Amino acid sequence: MHFAKNPFPGMNPWLESYWGDIHTRLTMYSCDSIQRQLPSDLHARVEEYLSVEEPYGDPKDRHRRIAPDIHISQQVASAYLDAALGATAVVLDDALSEPIRIRRIHEPDTLRYIEILDLKANRRVVTAIEFLSPANKTIAGRRQYLQKQNELIYGDVSLVEIDLLREGTWVMATCEDLYPRELRKPYRIAVTRRETTEESEVYKASYRSPLPDVRIPLRHNESDIRLPLQSLVNVAYENGRYGNAIDYSNPPEIPLTGDDEAWIQAWLAQHAVSTPEA
């Protein structure tokens, strides 16, 4: 079962398995959407930072890693390497054997977020928009993200957090036990304004209904702009050609449970369309 367009009214849980690509697309598309709405003396920019990863530790505490957005590697031809990796019946003489060089630790993930800069105030950061990633939810990555989160909030910067991943530990700026229970799952969106850091604005985010147009705060006494999150997810699905990549007869990598699984299967059956040509 394939769908040329995103078959869900809201977020698509199958897209979580392709988060490296989806995260990059949503960040870039969001930056472009925001840029078109800003006054001339505010600029939106995509910034990068490297995640921190614990080199050792309990494997149960390490979440699925995402691949770099683009990775180019050089394949070194080696008879010894080919033999070591591919041959099953040939045993090399010890004197001729060569070691295989492997990477000792993971490369850090490159994460991206959006900053809105005030050109009249020496490029001061007005607002930061974060699409959370699995790397933000590892042990070390979470510590790094929470430190950055505090620096933004207490540095007089509005923070918009968008978590479209069901898996992983809680990293939102709003404490989990204070977050409305009905809005904790499956996804989370929160806006913490620089003027009122003791509270956050939270949105419902699901696959059962369209993702919201998130209100993005700017400077004091300026009107909010809006981030059309659902349309951006739909464009990422179509531009990424996930209609041909995802087979909905197979469950998503991150399992669905209970009522969610039943609702999604019923929705897919009700809205089934013909398989598009590859």
Image (spheres, rainbow, N blue to C red):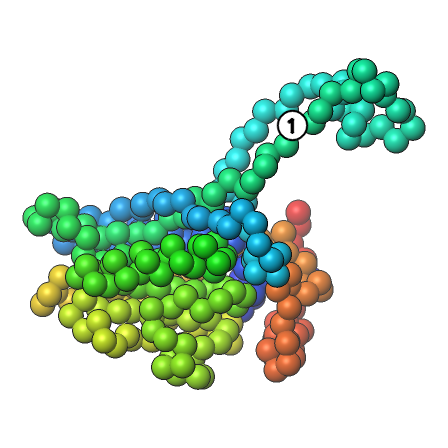
What is the residue that sits farthest to the right in this orientation?
89
Residue at 88% across / 24% down in the picture?
Answer: 91
Q: Quadrant of the N terminus?
A: bottom right
Label 1 sits on a secondary structure element that is loop
List x then y, in percent, for residue 254. Answer: 61, 64
Q: Residues within 10 Å of mark 1 (few under 14, many from 20)?
A: few
User: Front-most of 262 and 61?
Assistant: 61
Residue 262 location (% of width, % of height): 65, 79
Q: Position of residue 204 (x, y in %)?
A: 40, 77
The quadrant holding residue 188 is: bottom left
**Position of 68 relative to 10 (above/below):** above
Residue drawn at x 25%, y 77% as measured from the top left: 199
x then y, percent, for residue 264: 61, 74
Which residue is pictured at 38% across the width and 52% down the height?
Answer: 27
Q: Would residue 241 be seen by someone viewing this image from the given angle?
A: no
Answer above or below: position of 127 versus 86: below
Q: Residue at x 68, y 58 (%)?
A: 247
Q: Give the side of residue 231 with respect to residue 215, left or right.
A: right
Q: Is 242 situated left or right of 200 in this image?
A: right
The residue under label 1 is which amino acid type?
Arg
Q: Relative to 255, is 130 on the left or the right?
A: left
Looking at the picture, tell me which residue is in the foreground, 223 or 183. Answer: 183
Residue 113 appears in the figure: yes
Residue occupied by mark 1 = 101
